[in-house]
């Protein structure tokens, strides 16, 4: 497993967990802000993602949390502030519940409360909606152009980190790092085993950081889910990002870093 490490003299350090089909590079700008404040960080490519290995099995939140615990043990880390984005938030909840000695506080970035079984009427409907597009063979310049058009406020660093979700071949053609069948194994696990059952084990402070859509109806549904999560947690705070992208760590790295430092 690849770990992108930044050292810092101040405690605690941060463990940064990306979302589904993403990679650790998307935390780089935020990690730089944490380093400027004196805090070290460890951003991990989960199995099948980024530059980590692609084994034949283990594509579920429980195994991902166990992988993170193994990384923390190997690096002799403890009392971490763990930040997880999207599916990585669900994984972070599992890590904190099953390995509480490792986790001092949690930051759940537009994830950690995702329960697909409440958002879709059936698994078939969910699978159809969330099956990723087939991007193999797309040219990298097409991907960059699409990202710049759809995310005009993202930095070049964030654009290139998102491109790195896929491999770039010698002729500039993209290929998936995480195959679609493995991707859908993770989605199925999200459907079958949402994180809420682990909330009673979370006694550490938890910061919930939702991106609030501009559509009022969607915003109301999302806010209800976040508030329900906060009420089920022992020590929860909500920090909303109105109009924010799902990848808040790419869009607002400085602001999100400041939120995590306030959590410290």
Image (cartoon, rainbow, N blue to C red):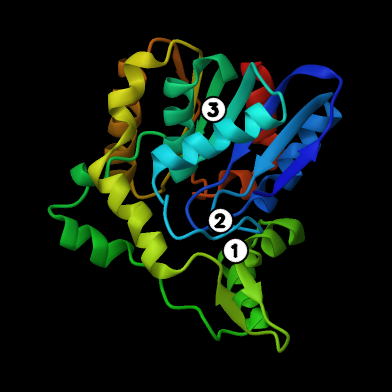
Residue on which disc 3 sits: 107
Residue at 33% in and 66% down = 131
Helix, strand or loop at mark 3: strand
Q: Which of marks 3 and 1 is in front?
A: 1
* Placement of 176 over or under 45, stated as above or below: below
Residue 165 disc label? 1
Question: Residue farthest to the bottom?
Answer: 171
Question: Residue farthest to the left?
Answer: 121
- Asked whether the beta carbons under mark 3 and mark 2 sit within 8 Å of each other, the answer is no
Disc 3 residue crowd, few under 14, some 14–19, many 20+, Cα 10 Å? many
Q: How far apart are marks 3 and 2 (CA)?
A: 18 Å
Residue on which disc 2 sits: 22
Query: Is 141 left or right of 150, judged from the image as shown?
Result: right
* Placement of 261 over or under 29, stated as above or below: above
* Placement of 87 over or under 236, stated as above or below: below
> Residue 57's x, y, as percent?
42, 55
Q: Quadrant of residue 220?
A: top left
Q: Is residue 111 visible?
A: no
Give whichever of 43, 239 is nearer the camera: 43
Q: In which quarter of the image is residue 234?
A: top left
- Asked whether the beta carbons under mark 1 and mark 2 sit within 8 Å of each other, the answer is yes
Helix, strand or loop at mark 2: loop
* Placement of 233 over or under 46, stated as above or below: above
Q: Can residue 186 be seen in this view?
A: yes
User: Which numbered disc flags the more N-terminal residue, 3 or 1?
Assistant: 3
> Residue 54's x, y, as percent?
54, 60
User: Which numbered disc flags the more N-terminal residue, 1 or 2?
Assistant: 2
Disc 2 residue crowd, few under 14, some 14–19, many 20+, Cα 10 Å? many
């Amino acid at each position: 497993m690849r770990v992108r490490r930044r050292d810092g003299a101040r405690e605690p350090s941060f463990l940064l967990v990306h979302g589904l089909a993403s990679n650790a590079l998307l935390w780089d700008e935020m990690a730089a802000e944490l380093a400027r404040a004196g805090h070290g960080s460890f951003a991990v490519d989960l199995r099948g993602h980024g530059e980590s290995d692609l084994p034949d099995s283990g594509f579920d939140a429980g195994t991902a949390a166990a992988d993170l615990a193994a990384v923390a043990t190997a690096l002799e880390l403890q009392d971490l502030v763990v930040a997880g984005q999207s599916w990585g938030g669900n994984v972070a909840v599992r890590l904190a519940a099953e390995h509480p000695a490792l986790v001092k506080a949690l930051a759940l970035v537009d994830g950690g409360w995702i329960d697909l079984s409440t958002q879709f009427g059936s698994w078939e409907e969910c699978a159809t909606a969330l099956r990723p597009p087939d991007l193999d063979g797309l040219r990298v310049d097409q991907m960059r152009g699409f990202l710049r058009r759809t995310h005009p406020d993202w930095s070049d660093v964030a654009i290139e980190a998102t491109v790195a979700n896929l491999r770039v071949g010698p002729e500039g053609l993209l290929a998936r790092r995480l195959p679609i069948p493995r991707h859908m194994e993770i989605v199925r696990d999200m459907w079958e085993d949402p994180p809420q059952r682990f909330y009673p084990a979370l006694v550490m402070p938890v910061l919930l950081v939702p991106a609030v859509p501009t559509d009022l109806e969607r915003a109301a549904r999302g806010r209800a889910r976040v508030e329900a999560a906060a009420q089920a947690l022992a020590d929860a705070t909500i920090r909303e990002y109105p109009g924010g992208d799902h990848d808040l760590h790419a869009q607002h790295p400085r602001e999100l870093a400041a939120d995590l430092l306030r959590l410290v």
